[in-house]
Image: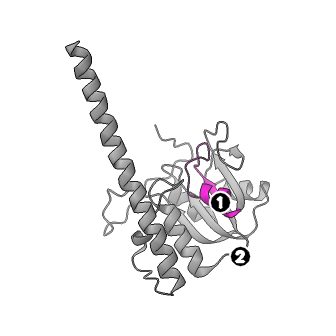
Amino acid sequence: MRRFIKRFRGWTLSRLKHAKKKARWAVRNLVNGVRIKTELSTGTFPSADLTRYERSVCSQNGEDGILEAIFTVIGTTNKYFVEFGVGSGRSCNSARLAGRYGWTGLWMDGKAGPSRGPLAVYREFITAENITPLLEKYGVPESFDLLSIDIDGSDYWVWKAITKHRPRVVVIEYNASVPPTESRVIEYDPEFRWP
């Protein structure tokens, strides 16, 4: 019985800790959602500090709110996005744009399984050599609103290889443990795969 009580107590404390973390994110999302609507509708957008608008609904690190703030200020042209490294499409930077705001676009992932988002996820291994042919294969317009790159390693090199297409806003994953005063990039390897 004591063993059961000890296990139950540990499980309960773990669940409470998890619930507390979720509650903090929920409050942050609510506050930043109100901030976006208030500041942007009154024209008081302090663009130097985009972290003020972080809000995670489908994204991992607050990109949902930041993208909403950016596009509220600059507007949209065709509401088209390209995102690669989306997994199943459930938790990525463009999922909320597609699901809530009616955007269309292209999702690709090298390990794509069944899509759990509003769009199909195409299984494509992205390299600097094949990115332009892939964008052409799927009929991506030369100018579009959002490009999001999260391919764990070759992000910079793939971004550098995109010369024909012109996204208005670009989100690229980076390693936050590298200080902003340092410029680093991994050596390019078209066969690189994150472990």
The residue at 51%/87% (across/down) is 43
Disc number placed over residue 100 in the picture, else none: 1
Furthest residue in direction top, as rendered: 1
Magenta region, residue range: 83-103
Q: Is 80 on the left or on the right of 30, as rendered? A: right
Q: Secondary structure at mark 1?
A: helix
Q: Secondary structure at mark 2?
A: loop
Could you say where residue 104 lies in the image, as x and y percent from the top left?
73, 60
| Corner quadrant of residue 1 | top left
| Frontmost residue, 95 versus 128 | 95
Residues at marks 1 and 2, CA–CA distance in whole angstroms: 17 Å
| Frontmost residue, 153 versus 167 | 167
Residue 38 lies, with reference to residue 170, above or below; the image says below
Can residue 95 be found in the magenta stretch? yes
| Corner quadrant of residue 5 | top left
Residue type, mark 2 in image: Thr
Check disc 2 and report the residue beneath it.
Answer: 77
